[in-house]
Amino acid sequence: MPDARARRSAYLAWIAVCLLWGTTYLGIRIALETIPPFLMTSMRWVIAGAIIVAVLKLRGERLPASSQWPALTLLGVLFMGFGNGWVVWAEQTITSGLAAVLVAAAPFWMVAVERFMPGGERLSLLRVAGLIVGFAGIVLLVWPEVRFGAGREFLLAVGATQLACFGWSLGSSYARRRKSDENVLAAAGLEMLLGGLCVLAVALARREWTALTFTPRTLGALVYLIVAGSIAGFSAYAYALKHLPVSTVSLYAYVNPVIAVLLGTLVLDEPLSPRLIVAGAVVLVGMAMVRRS
């Protein structure tokens, strides 16, 4: 019975991830109006992680042993540094909706990473076909810009989103295989804090603080990213990942692009082109094939 209850809670956590993370692309785009990318990423995760760790300490909860901190730091770098940091960097150039659709490739990367992990699943014919269809959707999305001489910044942004997908997928597979009975929320808080500190080192090396300013709009977006996107969203993701298969948890990428594209269009007047709709649909069909296999 406890396992069934935990599984129901994990599905509720997964639903929260779908809804909350779909809105973060808009929050990132707004925050970037005055906050440099890696500095914003580090502030988001360091503050969120510090809040979680402090609350747990006040409640007398036990934090993961120091021997686990190297592994949690690695997860923090993969999730916060690669998985989130490169998406933030990419959104300086591309729209929030396009970023969300490109990041929808995460399940494809997860399948590829899982294939080469110990005990990973073999690639079936249907799964390979789904990967091809999904890749075709991404090509359809970016090919016109590539064909007509898109700027170097655009191509680098597209590449950054795929680097983010790879880092996130690698972190998810590693987190799934870690044998630990530690408090999920405590581990998530330390991952945020340690990973955010690593990103902060990058921001400081880039001297991003010299360009830092705040407006009520960007400060509000940052607070939203900390509370909803980080504390609530990532904690829910960590819980779902502990109790559900990686392939199931990764399906949040079905919902995120839809929410992100709609919000980007309604709030920021980002263009909603037919090509974006068709390409996004092709990517989602590919994901469905991968999942069905």
Image (cartoon, rainbow, N blue to C red):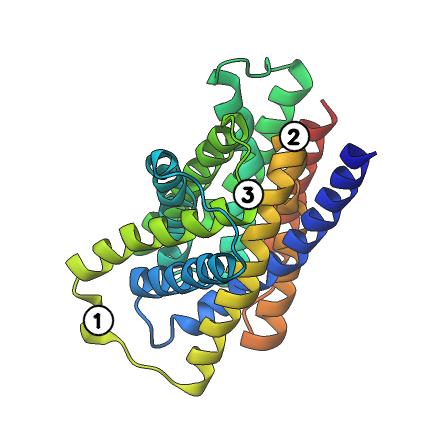
Q: On the image, numbered disc 1 is attached to which residue? A: 209
Left or right of 71, for residue 57: right
* SS for dot 2: loop
Residue 255 x/y as whole percent: 68, 51
Give the position of the C terminus as an image quadrant. top right
Nearer the camera: disc 1 or disc 3: 3
Give the position of the N terminus as an image quadrant. top right
Disc 1 or 3, which lies upstream in sequence? 3
Determine the residue positioned at 62% across, 60% down: 20
Cβ–Cβ below 8 Å for labels 2 and 3? no
- Mark 1: which amino acid? Trp
Disc 2 or 3, which lies upstream in sequence? 3
Q: On the image, numbered disc 3 is attached to which residue? A: 183
- Mark 3: which amino acid? Asn
Q: On the image, numbered disc 2 is attached to which residue? A: 245
**Label 2 neighbourhood size at 10 Å, few (<14), some (14-19), many (20+)?**
few
Left or right of 211, for residue 127: right
User: How far apart in space, not on screen, are marks 1 and 3 (Cα)?
Assistant: 34 Å
